[in-house]
Amino acid sequence: MIIINVDVMLAKRKMSVTELTERVGLTMANISLIKNGKVKAIKLATLDKICEALDCQPGDILEHRADNPFKKKKPDA
């Protein structure tokens, strides 16, 4: 599972969603969907703009977590 940590970076940068919206050029609704992890995909161009606005790397925003740490992995074929 991929977790989007835009809210964490906003807090670290002491930036509001409104300010990020203005800097990135997306609607408030789209930034809110991204911030709340309600998107299934994000364009690299959008990620680039967010990283530029927040002065961070994609890894500061995106995090991978195992869906179920107790789930057995399928053997390699």
Image (cartoon, rainbow, N blue to C red):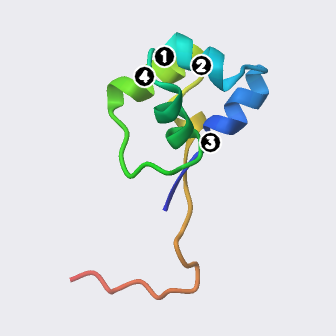
Q: Quadrant of residue 46?
A: top left
Left or right: 25 with respect to 36? left
Earlier sequence position, callout 3 versus callout 1: 3
| Residue 60 vertical placement versus 72 (above, below) | above
Mark 2 vs mark 4: in front = 2
**For the residues bearing labels 1 and 2, Cβ distance under 8 angstroms:** yes
Give the spatial CA distance, label 4 vs label 1: 9 Å
**For the residues bearing labels 3 and 2, Cβ distance under 8 angstroms:** no
Is 2 or 24 nearer to us in this picture? Answer: 24
Give residue 20's mark.
2
Amino acid at the residue labelled 1: Val
- Please name the residue shown 43% across and 48% down the image: 39
Question: What element does badge 1 sit on?
Answer: helix
Earlier sequence position, callout 4 versus callout 3: 3
- Please name the residue shown 59% across and 23% down the image: 56
Q: Which residue is mark 1?
A: 24
Looking at the image, the residue that sits furthest to the left is 77
Is 25 or 62 nearer to us in this picture? Answer: 25
Q: Which residue is mark 3?
A: 5
Amino acid at the residue labelled 3: Asn
Q: Position of residue 29 (x, y in %)?
A: 50, 34
**For the residues bearing labels 3 and 1, Cβ distance under 8 angstroms:** no
Amino acid at the residue labelled 4: Asp
Mark 3 vs mark 2: in front = 2
Mark 3 vs mark 1: in front = 1
Give the spatial CA distance, label 4 vs label 3: 15 Å
| Residue 52 vertical placement versus 41 (above, below) | above
Q: Which residue is mark 4?
A: 48
Give the spatial CA distance, label 1 vs label 2: 6 Å
